[in-house]
Amino acid sequence: TQLLEQSPQFLSIQEGENLTVYCNSSSVFSSLQWYRQEPGEGPVLLVTVVTGGEVKKLKRLTFQFGDARKDSSLHITAAQPGDTGLYLCAAPGIDGGSEKLVFGKGTKLTVNP
Amino acid sequence: NAGVTQTPKFQVLKTGQSMTLQCAQDMNHEYMSWYRQDPGMGLRLIHYSVGAGITDQGEVPNGYNVSRSTTEDFPLRLLSAAPSQTSVYFCASSSGQVNQPQHFGDGTRLSIL
């Protein structure tokens, strides 16, 4: 069973600070997705990274896929209260495609005004 | 823009009762999945389907049944509810194409007493 380890598990910061959360595994992935989940709602896709070393930007969010495609990071610049939520990374299982995503346990981010 | 619709949003059951969680999607997606989300455990795959008439087990299938008689609907049945099945349940759908996102419903919060 492949595992996606996310760190930190919890993060509480002040508005305007920068932060980075991580998603690591011992397995190589064909792709990796990042989702954000707000209370009372389902996860929503933020980005998919496919190529080793790939960097994608979504406004103040920067996503990076490791060169070896075993890890990924999400960096948020100048965090805002609206960034509060649970950030989940997910990747296709070894024996499956997108129908069998494996999720990390998530990083719960709180941005205080 | 209905997307993935789950009903009910909340449910309380007594141990031993049965019930069906409903999930419907209007995006003509081939793939549908059921996850449960527990504190500190992330999202775990219960059952999934890659098309009408086809279902398979995920990581934690015991105590749950599914069927896929139509493309749109993917109900999850609890045959004899147990307190360990207290959780938030999410249904998701995707097109099945490589690297496409999973679209999640807003979840059903289920408590078993």
Image (cartoon, rainbow, N blue to C red):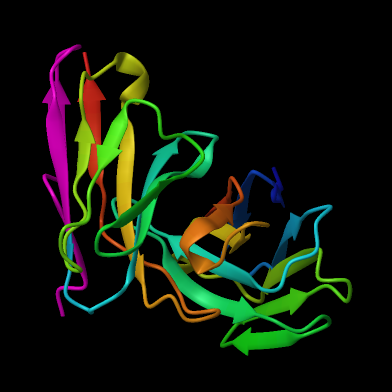
Q: Is residue A30 left or right of residue B27?
A: right
Q: Which residues are magenta?
A: B1-23
In this picture, is A96 found above or below A61?
above
Residue positioned 51% across, 75% down in the render: A46
Q: Quadrant of residue B79?
A: top left
Which residue is more in the foreground, B87 or B57?
A: B57
Q: Residue furthest front?
A: B53
Say if the magenta span includes residue B15.
yes
Is B45 left or right of A24, judged from the image as shown? left
Q: Is residue A59 above or below residue B67?
A: below
Work out whether residue A11 or residue B19 is closer to the camera in this orientation and state it.
Answer: B19
Name the spot of residue A72 as percent of width and height, x first. 75, 67
Residue at screen point 48% across, 79% down: B100
Q: Is residue A98 left or right of residue B3?
A: right
Quarter of the image with the N terminus of chain A is top right
* Res A112 seen here: no
